[in-house]
Each structure stands twice: as structure tokens, then as C-alpha cells.
């Protein structure tokens, strides 16, 4: 079975892919020493040596994580947790991403009468708001979040968490499932 990325994420994925392939980064990012496709510097940045000791690496305070540094989404929620989140529905299949070299990390659970998909991708506060400028916010999840048409999108620091929930019980049930799944995932990032 072929797995398709979630629809609202296609635009962002295309932008990330173009940037990765061209070796560019988003304005304001650390462009000095960047290697194409890595999203970060190719050499360690260090502070100068002092009388008290050797140079030490500077912490990456403003770097955006690469998809390879993001966790395996299918490992963030167990099959039993997904079944419990969906009211005991049985899982028919689990569709993982292509591994650490995937352009985004995701997992999709096909259930009897429901579907849950979670996607992780690098982002920044500016990029998240640019991609989702006028959407109503959802309080209490991450640093920024909104829900629209079965999709809950959350920014936690420099990670975008996308949750798609589809049930047969309607939009309120979809939103509830997406919110509960997101809360579990956010607690594990």
C-alpha cells in the first residue's frame, strides 16, 4: 500500500525538499559552513580557548532539527495506546515512514472505522505562522497550534507535529482524538 503524506503538509514538504536539495536555509538560520541537505553546519562551532581550559563546543541554540534527528513516530505510540485512543478499535495496518533518511518522519495507523496519522517535521516560529497565518489557535498544546478539517498542527520549539484523525463520529470526535494523541506525542518529544 502506498502511503501519501497528509495534504496540508505537501506545500511545506515541497519547500523543505527544495531547500534541502539546493543547500539553502531559511533566512535567519546559520548559513556559515552549511552543507547541502544537512540543515546545519558541517563543522563544530566552538568558543575561544580561555586561560581556564580548552575551547568548548557552543550549544546549538537556534538550529532547526534535521528530519534524521527526529524520532521514529511509530515508536512514540504503541499499538495498544493507539487502539485505546480510538476506543478499542483494532489496528488493520501501520504505515511507517522510510526511516531516518526520510524528508519528514511520520506514522499512519489504519484502524477499523478510523485513521490516525502523525507527522514530525522541522520548522521555525516564523515558518509555522507563515504557513498557517489565519487559522484559529488551539490553546494548551505546544507553543502554537490550530485545528482545521481533521488536522491538528502544533509547533513545539522547532518541531511541527501534524496529527490527522479521521473517525466515523464527526468533527468533534476527530478533534478529540487528534488532541489526545498529540498530547501523548508532545510529552515524549
Image (tube, rainbow, N blue to C red):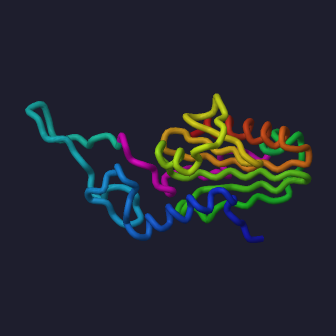
Front residue of 2/99: it is 2
Look at the image and tell me whether residue 102 can be seen. Answer: no
| Quadrant housing the C terminus | top right
The answer to which quarter of the image holds residue 23 is: bottom left
Kindly give the residue lying farthest to the left in the view shown: 51
Q: Residue at x 88, y 44 (%)?
A: 170
Q: Is residue 118 visible?
A: yes
* Residue 10 to residue 28: above or below: below
What x and y, as percent, mark residue 100? Answer: 54, 60
Give the residues in magenta: 61-79
Q: Quadrant of the N terminus?
A: bottom right
For this rendering, which residue is in front, 161 or 15?
15
**Camera-side residue: 182 or 56?**
182
- In the displayed structure, 189 sits above or below 164; it is above
Q: Image check: 119 left or right of 103?
A: right
At 74% across and 36% down in the image, what residue appears? 180
Relative to 10, is 58 on the left or the right? left
Residue 74: % across, % down: 68, 52
x, y percent for residue 175? 78, 40
Q: Is 62 a magenta residue? A: yes
Task: Indicate whether residue 78 is drawn in magenta.
Answer: yes
Name the residue at 65% across, 48% down.
162
Q: Nearer the viewer, residue 98 or 181?
A: 181
Q: Residue at x 43, y 49 (%)?
A: 64
Which quarter of the figure has residue 156?
top right
Amino acid at each position: 500500500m502506498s502511503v501519501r503524506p497528509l495534504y496540508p503538509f505537501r506545500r511545506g514538504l515541497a519547500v523543505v525538499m527544495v531547500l534541502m536539495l539546493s543547500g539553502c536555509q531559511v533566512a535567519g538560520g546559520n548559513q556559515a559552513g552549511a552543507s547541502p541537505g544537512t540543515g546545519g553546519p558541517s563543522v563544530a562551532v566552538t568558543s575561544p580557548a580561555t586561560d581556564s581550559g580548552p575551547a568548548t563546543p557552543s550549544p546549538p541554540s537556534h538550529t532547526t532539527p534535521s528530519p534524521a534527528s527526529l524520532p521514529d513516530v511509530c515508536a512514540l505510540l504503541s499499538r495498544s495506546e493507539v487502539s485505546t485512543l480510538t476506543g478499542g478499535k483494532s489496528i488493520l495496518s501501520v504505515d511507517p515512514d522510510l526511516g531516518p533518511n526520510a524528508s519528514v518522519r511520520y506514522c499512519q495507523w489504519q484502524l477499523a472505522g478510523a485513521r490516525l496519522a502523525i507527522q514530525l517535521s522541522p520548522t521555525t516560529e516564523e515558518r509555522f505562522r507563515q504557513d498557517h497565518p489565519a487559522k484559529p489557535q488551539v490553546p494548551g498544546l505546544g507553543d502554537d497550534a490550530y485545528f482545521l478539517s481533521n488536522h491538528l498542527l502544533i509547533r513545539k520549539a522547532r518541531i511541527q507535529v501534524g496529527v490527522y484523525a479521521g473517525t466515523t463520529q464527526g468533527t468533534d470526535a476527530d478533534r478529540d482524538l487528534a488532541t489526545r494523541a498529540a498530547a501523548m506525542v508532545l510529552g515524549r518529544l
